[in-house]
Image: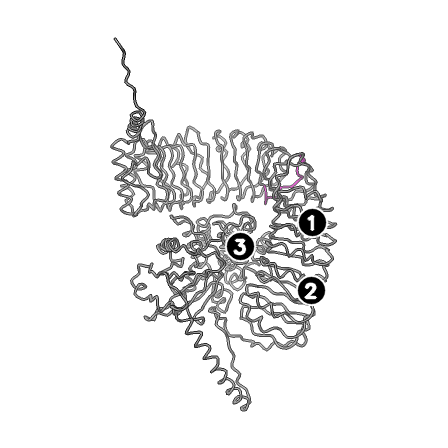
Amino acid sequence: MNNRYIPISPLFFFLFIIIVQYASSQLPSTQLTTMNNLNELIQTVTNNSKWDSSQNPCSWTGVFCAQNTLSITNLSLSSFSLSEIVNASSWSSLVCEIETLQSLDLSNNHLTSIPPPLLSSCTALKVLNFSSNKLTGLLPGFDTGLRSLEVLDLSRNSFDSVSIDSQFESLNNLKSLNISYNSFTGPVPVKLGESMLLQELQISMNSFTGVIPDRIVEYRNLSVLDLSYNRLTGSIPAGIGQLSSLEQLVLSANNLTGAIPLSIARMPALKRFSANQNGFTGPIPDGITSHVKNLDLSYNNLNGSIASDLLLQPNLLTVDLSSNNLEGFIPVNASKSLFRLRLGSNRLTGTIPIWSFGDGDSSLTYLELDHNDLNGMIPPELGLYKNLSLLDLSHNNLVGSVPPELGDLNRLQVVQLDHNRLSGEIPDEISALQILVKLNMSWNSLSGPIPPSLSRLSNLTNLDLQVNNLSGPIPDLFANMDSLLELQLGMNKLGGVVRFLPTNLQIALNLSRNNFEGRIPDSLSRLQALEVLDLSNNRFSGDVPSSLGGMGSLIQLVLSNNLLTGSVPRFRQNVTVAIDGNINLSDTRSSSPPPADWKYKKTSSIGIVVASIAAVVALVILIVVAVIVSRKANRVNNEETNPSSQIEVVKSKLLTLNVIHRTNIDFTKAMKCAGYVSNIVLKTRFSTYYKAVMPSGTTYFVKKVNGSDRIFQLGSHDLIEQELETVGRLRNSSVMIPLAYTLTVDSAYLFYEFAEKGTLFDVLHGSLGNCLDWTNRYSIALGVANGLAFLHGCTSGPIILLDLSSKAVMLKSLNEPQIGDIELSKVIDPSKSTGNLSDVAGSVGYVPPEYAYTMRVTMAGNVYSFGVILLELLTGKTAVSEGSELAKWASTKSKEKHNCDQMLDSTVSWTSPAIRDQMLAVLKVALACVSVSPEARPNMRSVLRMLLNARN
């Protein structure tokens, strides 16, 4: 009998595999029904389109299925716009019908409470994530139906339970608990499951009080323990060394005291130890870096010397011991893996060591040895540390010349050598540092001319050479330094006639105490962004150019002790002008100048006493001139107000659903108003605001987003429309929401409600400043914080402001602030900017320090900018005062004992002791916001919480 074999064709085999795979990918009918019902429920209320009901749920976004069990195991509803509007019990009941569900992610929604079914019916859950919602009130118990739970994340909410131990007591399988960024008070929770399986405990950014409980060391499986940014007191438990699995110990920003236990140096798994911003005393334990890769003990009261082997461990990455009382020498040996070393603000002595890294290149990127008692010369061998980005040797006793070898460090972005005893000339080699952003060699004994080669530093924003012995003129090539925002040359021996200067200066131009002569150049008036101009103690002669009065951002002008003649031109009221020491210079300005107009309209004065003949002659002349000007103006206005000839409209659309606004807004009338220069009420870096009165009599802002510098997203109108539609759907009383828009070929015009009071800057620092009592200022602070927290928490993604300043905050009343320019991050592309630093980073004085390194606009950067606004409200000072940034001034002053009271605006703080105490509480919040380290700044939701707590 012949055996016959029937071959299986490849096609048949392929089809068979497809059928098997299709069958295996099908969910059980019960789960399929549940998911379709869940999709329908969510989509009905939220218009969510993330899921396609025609496809297998296992292919839906956020749905994960186990192939071997044919069931759903993980479900992510993150950023699904879930809120109390969606029937929480209904959708949560559906979720709990999925009996195989092990992980549920509900983060980034708008939930205000935890739906009861999730606490009782989701019995198989091992992971539950409720982070970044709006959960409030008391924390519910987790002891009814979640006994299998291993990971629980409730961070970034608004819980305010006083005691929370019992809520977690029955979670015997709990391995990870994160309740950071809430408002919890009371003692640190330690009843976290009787089986003691906990591996991660994160409770940072709350208000926990009391000591670190000894029982915490009984959780022997702990790998992460983060207790930072609370109000804990006492010392570190002596038994902390028993946590042999602990990898991260973070105790930053508490009120802990005592010595750091020696046992921490013997924890074999410990990789990160951060205990900065506390009150620890005593020496640094020997061997503390034996295992630790990242060590931060800054801002304590540690004393003694630094062990010789502390920097030598092969895996060491960062060491921050700044702002302590450490003495002795810097260790002469260091690991080549060391990335950041911060030893500033101590009492270290001796010379800067020359570290030998063998054959390997050094990883050292940030070296900060400032504010010590170091002596000797700057080692030329620093030129071998090729990765250096920041070098801060300021405030020491260093002598000798600046090593030319520093020019070999082509990654340097910041060099601070100020407040030493350096001598000799500035080496030409410095000009090779092509990405250098900040150069400070002030308060030394440098001599010789300013090298013209420094003009090749095309990215330099801050150049400070004041208080030296430099001589000669300012190099003409400095006029080409387009990125320069600050130029400090005061107190040298410079001289000659001032001719050419950088055109984009913004922070300060200081030429004081030199030997400059000749007339004050009229070209200074081109520095429209400059805030401080100091020409004092020179030999300038002639008249003060009247054009200086038109410098729109000027806050302070110092002309003292020169040879100036004539009279002082008129300036805006908020400009401080010093003219003493000029014998032949008279001040004819009125002793009671007219109030500053936030709309920047030109002021005029009318001469009353004139001779009758002169009046007749003047009148004839005026008539003739008026006829000529009127003809020209009519021609210009006819062109400006004819949108069809000047503005090519692509599309206009209403965004608001408010019937009143939809009825009042007249696009044709608005665009005509935007054609009149006289209707301009405010100019910002990116926008021009016009006042537009509609036929109904209602007034609106029409804001033109300037399309210069290639940063406006030209040719992408569809994208811009989508972004504006998204922004237009936002709802927050502290945010300026666009009501409508008109798109043209190269710009966008946005419509807003009119703010009667103008900008916070003009109210606070102008004629109405005295009207802002603490109640007003506190309301403004809360309003701006609320708006910014809202923008950072948008479900469609955080909205980060490109330019947050007091000029970007409008006031509908003295208690109603509104944040403007929120749409700039949507229609402006910073990566295409060809301008200077502040074109994309914000206004001078508000730019976070890390921008110099990252060139990225971030939420932490917005927090810094908000901190500056807080400081303005507290001190009454502008963001840049007397050539110094307010944030830096406040941070320095805060380190001086018993000096915080003096920082406050006395006209407000002296009103009552209660107000003073509240202002001091808000000052702590402001100082936290302007922390140099982005990681140390609280997020805006925490800032808002801290501001609310400040009134208690």
Query: What residue sits right under mark 1 in the picture?
Result: 396
> What's the mark number on residue 513?
2
Prevalent SS, magenta region: loop
In percent of the image, x 33 and y 31: which residue is there? 124
Label 3 near label 1: C-beta < 8 Å? no
Q: CA distance from mark 1 to mark 3?
A: 27 Å
Horizontal relation, residue 318 to residue 744: left or right: right
> What's the mark number on residue 847?
3
Q: How dense is the environment of label 2, judged by Cα within 10 Å: few (below 14), some, or many (20 and up)?
A: many
Three-letter residue code for mark 2: Arg
The percent position of residue 892, horizontal first and vertical second, equals 60, 53
Region in magenta: 297-311
Residue 280 in which image quadrant: top right
> What's the mark number on residue 433?
none
Residue 498 in which image quadrant: bottom right
Vertical placement of residue 769 versus 176, above or below:
below
Three-letter residue code for mark 3: Val
